[in-house]
């Protein structure tokens, strides 16, 4: 689920990223049961099961994690941020709170504000594209074989 770049992260950076993933899932204020399963799989890169349990508990309570700035470099930072964009788009919706959370994480990863705004715009574009794909798939299913 989460890309192999996590192998390049230190233990502390992995925990930070796992908490950020949990926060992204919680950001819209509604956590479906399927999202919890996704979260469990997405943070399976953590070695300590207590960390996994703590993050699942945060999500159950609806708490956003308290994260501090993280210096990981541009490439790893972008991989982390783009993974969160994909997670945010899983339900083909991007709430204002999810957009705000992406902004917060982008800032904590020490990206400039204009770049973070471009990432949020990209996330909005992906939501529209996913919704259009879903609409076309539904339409395709309704077409008769002779059309």
Image: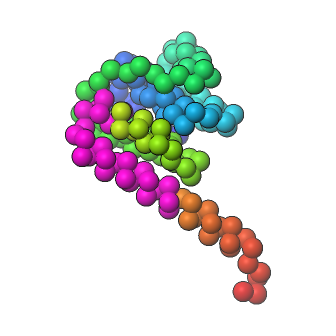
The secondary structure that most of the magenta stretch takes on is helix
Estimate the x, y position of residue 147 in percent, counting from the top left: 72, 86
**Residue 4 visible in rendering:** no
Q: Is residue 117 left or right of residue 41?
A: left
**Residue 36 visible in rendering:** yes
As for residue 144 lying within the magenta part, the answer is no
- Image position of 16 with respect to 73: above or below: above
- Residue drawn 36% across and 33% down? 105
Estimate the x, y position of residue 106 in percent, counting from the top left: 32, 36
- Residue drawn 25% across and 27% down? 71
Return the residue nearer the eye: 82 or 113. 113
As for residue 106 lying within the magenta part, the answer is yes
Range shown magenta: 105-129
- Residue drawn 73% across and 78% down? 143
Q: Residue furthest bottom?
A: 146
Q: Is residue 75 left or right of residue 86?
A: left
- Residue drawn 24% across and 46% down? 114
Estimate the x, y position of residue 90 in percent, counting from the top left: 56, 47
Estimate the x, y position of residue 37 in percent, counting from the top left: 64, 32
Image quadrant in which you'd find residue 84? top left
Image quadrant in which you'd find residue 146? bottom right
- Image position of 59 with respect to 3: above or below: above
Q: Is residue 1 left or right of residue 119?
A: right
């Amino acid at each position: 689920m989460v890309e192999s770049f996590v192998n390049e992260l230190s233990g502390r950076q992995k925990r930070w990223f796992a908490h950020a993933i949990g926060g992204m899932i919680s950001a819209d204020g509604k956590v479906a049961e399927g999202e919890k399963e996704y979260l469990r799989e997405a943070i399976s890169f953590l070695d300590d099961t207590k960390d996994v349990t703590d993050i699942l508990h945060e999500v159950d309570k609806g708490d956003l994690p308290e994260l501090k700035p993280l210096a990981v470099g541009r490439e790893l930072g972008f991989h982390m941020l783009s993974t969160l964009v994909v997670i945010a788009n899983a339900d083909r919706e991007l709430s204002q709170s999810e957009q705000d959370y992406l902004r917060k994480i982008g800032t904590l990863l020490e990206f400039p504000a204009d770049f973070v705004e471009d990432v949020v715009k990209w996330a909005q574009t992906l939501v529209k594209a996913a919704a259009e794909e879903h609409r076309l798939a539904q339409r395709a299913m309704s077409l008769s074989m002779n059309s």
